[in-house]
Structure formats: C-alpha cells, structure tokens
Amino acid sequence: MWPGVLCGGTHQPNGKPHTNNTGPINLQDTTIRVDLNLEGTTLAHGAVDISGAKIGGRLDCSGGKFRNHGDIALKARGIETKGSVYLKKGFEAEGEVMLWGAKIGGQLDCSKGIFRNPCDIALNAENIETNGSVYLKKGFEAEGEVMLGSARVGGQMDLRGVFQERLVLEHAVVRKLVDDTGCRPEQGMLFLDGFQYEEIAYESPVEWKDRVQWLALQEKFTPGPYEQLAKVFQARGEARAARKVLIAKHKRQIRSVELSPVRLGPVVVSGVRRRRLSPVLCFRRLLGLLVGYGHEPWRAAWFLVGIVLVAWGTFTAAAGSEQIVPVAEPHNTEALERATGNKGVHADKCVFEMAYPCFHGIWYALDTAVPFVDLRRQSYWVPVGGYRWAMWGVIVAGWLLVSAVAIGLTLLFRE
C-alpha cells in the first residue's frame, strides 16, 4: 500500500520502472498528482487495484503483465486521469481489465495489447469518457468480451484489432469510426444498438455494401444502427448509399421476423415456412421490389414501362388476329357500316376517311396500363377471347404499381 497522496515527478511502485510482484498492488482511492508508471510491471498473481484513483498525469502500463486468471487483473473502475492511459506495447492481462466509468483526459491506447479472459469480459470500458481517441489496433487482441457500451469518446475509435468474442458498442458516442473488414468479430458477436458516430474514416471501408455487411454481424435486428449509418452517408452527400442502407434495413427486418410453428390438421407448418408464406411479409417484399420500400419510388416507372411494352405487343398481335373489335355501345354500329361500305371496322386496317378512331397498339396499351390517364381508346375498341383477360391483367398491374408507390411513400413519411 502506498500513501494516499503522492507528489513529485513520476510515481513508480517500489521506486523502479520495472517491478516483479507475486501479490496484489492496491492503490485504491489514491490521489497521485503526477504520472503513475506501471510500465513493464509483472504481477504473477492478484489484481492491480487503482479504483477511484485520481492521477494528475498519465497511467502507463505499457509492457506490463498482470495475471489474475478468472478474476480481475487490472481494476481501474472510476479512475480519473489528466493524461492518457496506455495499455500497449506488449501489455498482457490474464483476467478482466476493468476501466468502467473512467474519466481519461487524453486517449486510451491499447495498441499491441493482449487481453485474455475467455468466455468472460476481457476489457470492460463501459461508461468511460475520453477527451482523446480509443485505439484497439495494431496487434490488439481480445480473447474475451470487449465492452465499450455508453462510452463517450472525444476523438476516433479505432477497432482494427482482433476480437475473438463479443464486441459491445451499444449507446457509445464517438466522433469518428475506424475499422477494417478483416478485423471484425464473428457473426452474432457485434452489438451496435444506440451506437453513434459522426463520420467514418476514409481509411476504413466506406462502400455501402461493406457497411451493411458490418451491420449484418449483429446477433439481433435493431433499426437504429441502419438509420445511424444512413445519417452518416447523408452527411457525406451520398444519398444513394443512404437509400441502399435503409432498404437493407427493411430486408433484414423481414428476415428477422420470428413466427412460431402452427399445426393445420395433421400438417405442422414451421416458423420458417410461415415467414415465407405470410401474406403481410409477402406484400412487404413486393413493396421492396417495386418501390424500394418507398425509398426508390421511381422503380415503379421502369416496371410500368415494361408493362406498357408487353401490352403493346399483346394488343398489336390481337388486332392482327382480329381479336380487337369495335365497341358497339354507345356508338352507332350501323353508321359505321355505312361509312365503310358495309365492310365493317377492323383494328388492323385503319380507314382514315371514316369518323371512327383508328386502333393503335401503343395508345391502347398506355390507356389500359396507366391509371388516371384517359386516351378514350377503350371507349372504341375492346379485345375478345383470351385477350380480354390480358387487358384486365394490364389494368390490375397498373393500379398495383400506383398503390405500391402510394403505400411506399406513406411508409417513408412515417419514418
């Protein structure tokens, strides 16, 4: 145990920069007006406890080796430092490193630090506040959970280390995010709900597909991380990337719906099959296809062009096979016969000298496919036989597209 108040230059236990101890070190609630140097300190068993300590400079544990297997190796809960905290350059901990609630005046640098506490918490930095950055990079390795929930980081958070178990960033707030595709936790080991960041570093993957793959590592779907990423893309002026992220959010939400199995007589329908066959989810998938869940309503225009082209070809073929006939009412068919010399009116033979509109496949297709557009083609010509069903199919498809646009835009405004 060292005195409660220490003054001078740099404080070093036992007066040496490198110490070897077999038992615990206790500096709990100590006020140190200078740097606390534990650089190169080796602790074979027991914890280094500096909980509640107030350090006037930095805390340097670089190269230290603290071993307290199955328990806390470094307990620095609630410490306050005016300088940085260094757990780097060969720092090794067997057991939990607890920095919960620490207030750090500089940065937290764990570069080339190794944290081992398998199947438990390796680094607990929840609720920390740093004026500088947090570096978990360049040889950082955590065999155990890394907890950074509710952290407040004034600089960047660099996550280019190795995370073998859970990485928890829930409700953390940082200025800049730095990561890499090869330094991410496994599927289901990432927790991002409430994680806020103002920007993504340009040395990190910044393509929307890469970022969506990062979000897909979460164990459960939550909409917040997708909306946060879209917000960052919007701030970067990448509106298309923001839309793609929000579309990915809806797709992931649909895939995450869990339905319990149900028995229909002798047949048991699994939850997966219910999800695939659910009318509500099928309709939402259709909205995604047609209008991008409201984020890309112009998709419907391309589908409409396709419907018009198909209808044009279909009705033109029908006219050639005399399956398009004049509408008898309210028109005077006898007058039409007299006007054509009793030859009748044929859709594939336009008689310009008579007072009856000619049939044109393209105008007829537009009149049937596009809602709210009345070119009065259907008032004069009508398909017969199987082509009548084709006409109704085109009409229904047009109205379906318009409805999808309206519903998609409504959902978008609600968001």
Image (spheres, rainbow, N blue to C red):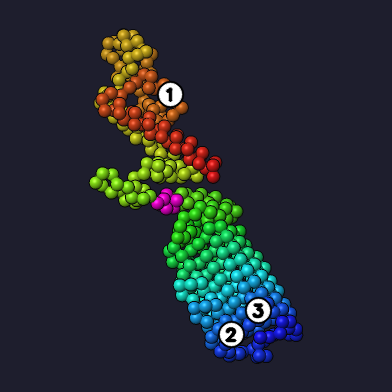
Q: Amino acid at mark 2?
A: Pro
Observer able to see residue 114: no
Specify the quadrant that holds the C terminus.
top right
Name the residue carrying label 2: 24
**Which SS class for mark 3?**
loop
Is residue 152 something one can see in this rendering?
Answer: yes
Quadrant of the image occupied by residue 6: bottom right
SS at badge 1: loop
Few, some or many residues within 10 Å of mark 1 (<14, 14–19, 20+): few
Query: Dot 3 corresponds to which residue?
Result: 28
Query: How far apart, in angstroms, are the residues tagged by discs 1 and 3?
Result: 86 Å
Q: Nearer the viewer, residue 334 or 173?
A: 173
Which residue does the numbered mark 1 point to in the structure image?
A: 375
Q: Which residues are magenta?
A: 252-258
Q: Which residue sits at x=30%, y=17%? A: 345
Secondary element at tag 2 = loop
For this orientation, the residue located farthest to the right is 8
- Vertical position of residue 362 compared to residue 68: above or below: above
Q: Residue at horizontal 44%, vertical 63%?
A: 188
Cα distance in 3D space between marks 1 and 2: 90 Å
> Badge 3: few (under 14), some or many (20 or more) residues near its Cα, within 10 Å?
many
